[in-house]
Image: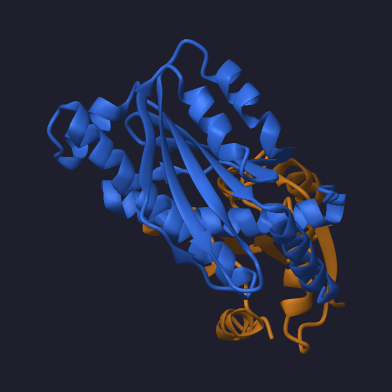
Amino acid sequence: MTELHFTDVQRDCLQELVNVAMGQASDKLARYLGTFVHLQVPSIALVEAALLSQHFSSRYQQQSATLVSLGFFGDQGLRGETIMLYQLANAGVIAQLLGYSDDAVSEAEMLTDISSVLTTTFLSGLAEQLENSFSYAAPRILSSRDQYFADKLAYTAEQWQLALQVDIRYQLTDYSFNCDMILLIPGEAVLRLRQTLDNILADF
Amino acid sequence: MALTALICDDSLLARNQLKKSLPSGFDANILTAGNGVEALTILRTREVGLVFLDLTMPELDGVGVLEAIKAEAMDCLVIVVSADIQPEMQKRVMELGALAFVQKPASADKLADVMHKYGLI
């Protein structure tokens, strides 16, 4: 069994790497949306993948959500999948801003585009700091306006062991836009990640 | 008397990275703060000549610190070291009186360039 525990120092290190990668992703998003993004300290949590859907079904209670998934593959066994979860309250406003037409198909297309901008920028930033490089699968929508998204999340998550849960709250200048990003990685990638963090920490 | 410099960042890694990336010719006593509130407490009680300031922090963020420094007319130079690289944010901190903006993670070369430019080394 893989021991998923991270020490406080490893956690702080990972939090800072996430912070830097988030800054790059937010800059890209701000340019893409033509607006300013208020950055907050991303809160990260490492949880067992099996417990994920439980957490999110209570958090998104009585709301439909869209899930967009992106697989990534790096060197030395560092690989995984990111999932972006969007609450749809503001999707219409953003669609208008970006010039997508106001229907479900365009909304899906828009969220796929935004996810692609956010996750590839975020992951590239993270990979660079880990002295790795990732390649990506095409983003795919796991569910849209689906009451049963928790089941789909559970199904996806059960293929992985560790979930790095990153809460992202993007407050745009004129409206709020919340999404959650989840990084799912397998056990051997956890070991690799921890070792890389230790190498970084040994330098300082 | 050597200069006193303050490194303000909520991340231990970032504080250590920055401390290690400072140019060898920079002779200063280094203090650290983990958020904006701690930074202001230090700035109000100690004579600090130079601040390396992160922006995205809990309690009080870097913009809040810059605003307080300006409002209280504190006599210190501020180099912002941040991951929030949006052009509008860079413009905002410069307007609030920051000396320079350095993108995270701060490289030793970039820090040396900036500090040399402003006569700090």
Instruction: State whether residue A144 is above or below residue A118.
Output: above
Instruction: State whether residue B21 is above or below residue A197.
Output: below
On the image, the x and y values in percent for residue A84 come to: 46, 40
On the image, the x and y values in percent for residue B38 come to: 78, 45
Quadrant of the rendering where the N terminus of chain B is positioned:
bottom right
Residue drawn 67% across the image and 38% down it: A49
The colour style of the image is by chain
Direction top: furthest residue: A62
Number of callouts in the render? 0
Of B113 and A91, the residue lying toward us: A91
Residue drawn 79% across the image and 67% down it: A195
Task: Left or right? Give the position of B73 relative to A108.
Answer: right
Of A55 and B119, the residue lying toward us: A55
Residue drawn 85% across the image and 47% down it: A5
Residue A64 visible in the snapshot: yes
Instruction: State whether residue B46 is above or below residue A148.
Output: below
On the image, the x and y values in percent for residue A94 come to: 26, 34
Direction bottom: furthest residue: B25
Residue B46 visible in the snapshot: no
Instruction: State whether residue A161 is above or below residue A72.
Output: above
On the image, the x and y values in percent for residue A100 come to: 15, 38
Quadrant of the rendering where the C terminus of chain B is positioned:
bottom right
Task: Left or right? Give the position of A58 relative to A3.
Answer: left
> Hey, which quadrant is residue B112 in on the image?
bottom right
Q: Which chain is orange?
A: B
Of B98 and A103, the residue lying toward us: A103
Q: Which chain is blue?
A: A
